[in-house]
Image: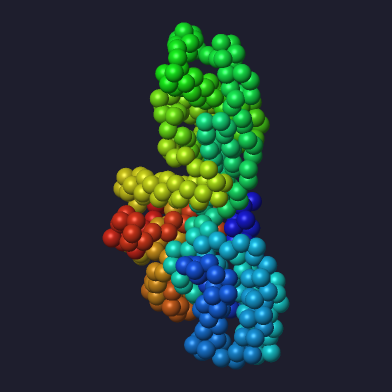
Amino acid sequence: MKRFGKIITKLLKQERGKSGFIFLSAYYPLEDKNKKQAKQRFKSLILNHFNQDKRLKHLRHLKIDLKKIVDNKLNQIPLLENGLGLFAKLPLKKNGTIPEEHITLTSLPHVFKKESFIDKTYDLDQLAFINSQGFTALIINLGHKDADFYLLNKDKWKKLTNLENDFFKVEEDEYLEKHAPLQGKSAIYGTGEANIARKKEAADQLFLNQVETHINTNKNFKLKTDYVLVFYSQSFAPFINQWQKKLAALLINSQVVLLPKNIQKEAEVKKQAKEEINKLQQEAKKDLFAKAQESYDNFVTNPAQIVEATREKRVSILFVEPDLKIKGWLINGSFVFLTKQKGAKRVRNIVPWLVKSIIESSGKIILINREDKLTKHKIAALLRF
């Protein structure tokens, strides 16, 4: 199971425990990755609840304990990404304590919006969306003399192998005589710049074939990958489109993307790869929303219909803004309504309960915002039936 999937499972299990607890959720985007500043701002967001929320007045003595635990957990994160998420199970008893295992702090690859929520359930929308955005990508940085292969699994980066161009391991003329395509053999025996250019062209063409063979025979590349990103030097341009077709046929379940960029440093390859995949996922989100809209009978934007469908476990995909608030009513701690029901409790925001219910019924959460320009609606859903 993926890292964020494990966290979601853990938090849902915490909620199913004994009553007498309230749950705090906080998401914080890291505009400045300075750890000291991140600590201060993030802790302020969390601890302000103890000053502002009446339900926590009797728990203000726990502020120091919570601060220590958050400090300790922040120090244990080796590398801060683009955001932080905190989920805390807090006791409602006046003499209650906070065990460290009731505090979950995680680094996040992306945070849509700074927000915090406290009630009888966790707010899992952003965490669920990040989990659904999981991917595995094969990254190839293709240079004239060698190629580096990397695996990017959501937030984990691993160098797989380096492949040297065989052309540079032996005498060039000997190699070309033995392996070059027939149409190139008669051309390499010229003089001057033309001869050098033809040698380089033949070497590039042969190296693409070598890379293709390497992928085909290496078991690490047989793993299911969602994306294959190839950064390549301009010298490969004459052959790259035809080679892309071969690569797509070889890795049939992957989206193959060619990027004409000559990158020297691994850190820059990683940065560029993440940016490109983010763009691809944005495009995929737009496509998903467009296809959902085509299912006229099963696509709804009316909150009342969405709430009813959620109770009936009929929501396949929920599109929702991360900070949307809808007042409503709650029965038995899980069934939500927009209108008052007998025995129901009034809640200030039913969206976290909607999200929780959809996750538990194996639905998908897709966060939307105005920048996506997908819809004027703040919430929409694709129903199973």
Identified at 42% across, 59% down, the residue is: 367
Identified at 43% across, 74% down, the residue is: 349
Any part of residue 246 in sight:
no
Tally of marks: 0
Return the x and y of residue 100 as percentages of the image width and height: 70, 74
271 lies above or below 189? below
Return the x and y of residue 116 as percentages of the image width and height: 49, 74
Return the x and y of residue 325 as percentages of the image width and height: 40, 72
Identified at 39% across, 64% down, the residue is: 321
- Residue furthest toward the front? 192
Any part of residue 160 in sight:
yes
Question: Seen in the image, is 98 located left or right of residue 151?
Answer: right
Seen from the viewer's position, the closer of residues 297 and 82 is 82
Residue 324 sits in which quadrant?
bottom left
Seen from the viewer's position, the closer of residues 150 and 341 is 150
350 lies above or below 226? below
Return the x and y of residue 341 as percentages of the image width and height: 43, 75
